[in-house]
Image: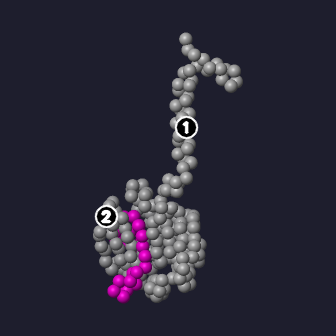
Amino acid sequence: PMAAFVGVYGHQMSTNFFRFAAPALALTLALGLSACSDDADDAQPGLSESTATGSVSNAETLTGATAAIAAAESAVSGTAFAIDTDRRGWEVAVAVGDREHEVVVDAAGENVLNSREDGRLDSEVSADLPNVKISLSQALALATKASPGTVEDAELDRERGVTIWAVTMLSGRTETEVYLNAADGTVVKVEKD
């Protein structure tokens, strides 16, 4: 004979119910609790993790980066001069007058997550910005043509007195630095690590 249990509403339930329902309930609770984790890395996986696993295409990364640049420039009314992957998406450095602003944008480039003034603009960046004719977004597109892969970071720099964009691309496990003349977009050099 099967043991029976009288439920809250007076219904009889067999032990078979508990044999099957209890594990299902435990699994449901476990999945629900794991989704409520307060770990920031689990809550919003960033680009570094996505590009490392290959789950984001090169085109999606370029699109996200260029959208993030546009969102950051719009948020603080300035000119972007550096971008880097961040666990939350993209960290974009933007020049506003003689001040530097750090703007964090989600991976898709759609939402500004954080923005703060980061102090006085570096004197080299300040001196180099007037020489820039190719925007950071244009530099990323040109670098992707020169060395296919996902964008990891880019910054305004100087090479032998020439203002350049230094763009790091990742293809598999290989990092490639693409250096572009910031005045005309020509490739100055490409170095693989």
Which range is magenta? 141-164
Q: Quadrant of residue 3?
A: top right
Horizontal and vertical percent position of residue 31: 53, 42
Q: Say which residue appears at 66% left-offset and 23% top-offset.
A: 7
Please state which of residues 73 and 93 is positioned toward the viewer in this rendering. 93
Residue 28: image tag: 1
In this view, 174 is above or below 157: above
**Mark 1 nearby-residue class (10 Å; few <14, some 14–19, many ≥20):** few
Please state which of residues 188 and 45 is positioned toward the viewer in this rendering. 45
Asked if marks 2 and 1 touch (Cβ < 8 Å), the reply is: no
Q: Quadrant of residue 76?
A: bottom right
Horizontal and vertical percent position of residue 151: 41, 67
Quarter of the picture containing the N terminus is top right
Q: Say which residue appears at 59% left-offset and 77% top-offset.
A: 77
Outermost residue toward the left in this view: 192
State the SS at label 1.
Answer: helix
Residue type, label 1 = Thr
In this view, 122 is above or below 70: below
In this figure, which residue is indicated by the disc labeled 2? 174
Quarter of the picture containing the C terminus is bottom left
Q: Say which residue appears at 38% left-offset and 76% top-offset.
A: 166
Which of labels 2 and 1 is toward the front?
1
Residue 159 magenta: yes
Horizontal and vertical percent position of residue 62: 44, 66
Residue type, label 2 = Thr
Q: Say which residue appears at 51% left-offset and 61% top-offset.
A: 88
